[in-house]
Image (tube, rainbow, N blue to C red):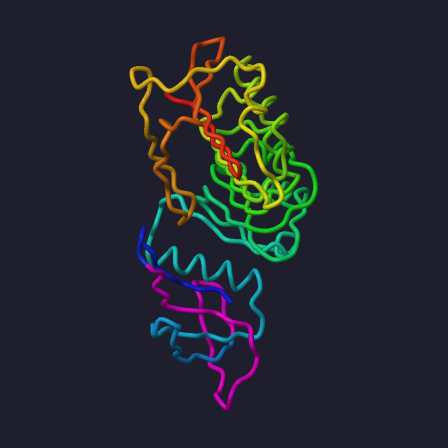
Amino acid sequence: MKFIAIQDWGIRLDVHIAFDDKTETSGMKPVELEIGDDFKTRGIVKTKLTKLKQEYCLISVPKLDAKVTKALHEHVKQLYRYTYLCGIEIGTNSLTEELPIYENVSKILVKGKSALELNDLDTFLSQYYLNLTTLLICSPINGEATSKLLEVGRVHLSYSDQCGISFLSKFNGQQINLFGAVLTEKELNEFIRKWMKSEGYLNLEFVTIYLSRESVLNRDLIIDQLEIESFDEKKRPGWYQSDIPLFMMKTNRLDFSRDDCFDVIRESDGKRASVLPTPSSFTFLVWN
């Protein structure tokens, strides 16, 4: 099912039209539909209620394929005449199918219960969306991170598992969030050391990692043989407010004045980063 909906920041989704490919007519006669300038089909039109008691128009068509989706997109674009950058949501099973190409896309959300093959995603992005700034993957993943994925500025992996540390070790972007990650203190120690030595992560601004349930971090092992500094309010703020929302994900205000937080300095330019490790999470912030 596909929707035409309006959503402002912090406001619930307001659904207006939904398209489905169910063929049951329930005694209703199909009507001819024109979508945009060049597409015609036949479908059943009726009104429905959402769980929030919103009334919307449900249109059932014989086949909900790329042609319908593209025509719908072009029709809405003509109605609203938008030129802003937008985001699209794609199912994991759809990446290898024929899909319409959308314009002005800066964000992509990939979601599904089946595992996402990273090579399929790389092929899809390389063909159509070379200037992507934000990528969210809310499905299990298989494979190694490719060069195209590593160039995206902001990346979120909901089920990073053991792929998370491989992604992080090669990441060239600004912000990365890893959920359900499986990694060790030694790997995080090496990540910090590489940043301090300017051996990688020159564009990095922010890292958030939430570990899998079976993983537990030891702060002392993370800082082993690293030159660190304690919090000093004269050198940097104690709090940080993330101001880069990923789709509709909430931003967080983080406390970097805690006793378990420490700072590291990049040798090449004196840039300061704060590290906040807990038994179940790891946060890394580069101050401007």
Q: Residue furthest top?
A: 268
- Give the image quarter of residue 165: top right
- Check if residue 236 falls in the magenta segment: no
> Can you say whether 99 is above or below 141 in the image?
below
Residue that appears at 55% across and 50% down:
138
Looking at the image, which residue is at 65% across and 46% down?
141
In which image quadrant can residue 100 be found?
bottom right
Q: Is residue 58 above or below residue 236?
A: below
Q: Nearer the viewer, residue 201 or 68?
A: 201
User: Looking at this view, is 178 or 53 the one in front?
Assistant: 178
Q: Which quadrant holds residue 222?
A: top right
Q: Residue at x 63, y 39 (%)?
A: 182
Q: Position of residue 103 (x, y in %)?
A: 46, 46
Position of residue 70 measured from the top left corner of the image (x, y, whole percent)? 50, 58
102 displayed left or right of 166: left
Q: Is residue 141 left or right of residue 41?
A: right
Residue 208, percent from left and from top? 49, 35
Q: Which residues are magenta?
A: 12-41
Residue 38 included in the magenta stretch of the image: yes
Q: Nearer the viewer, residue 139 or 272?
A: 272
Q: Quadrant of the C terminus?
A: top left
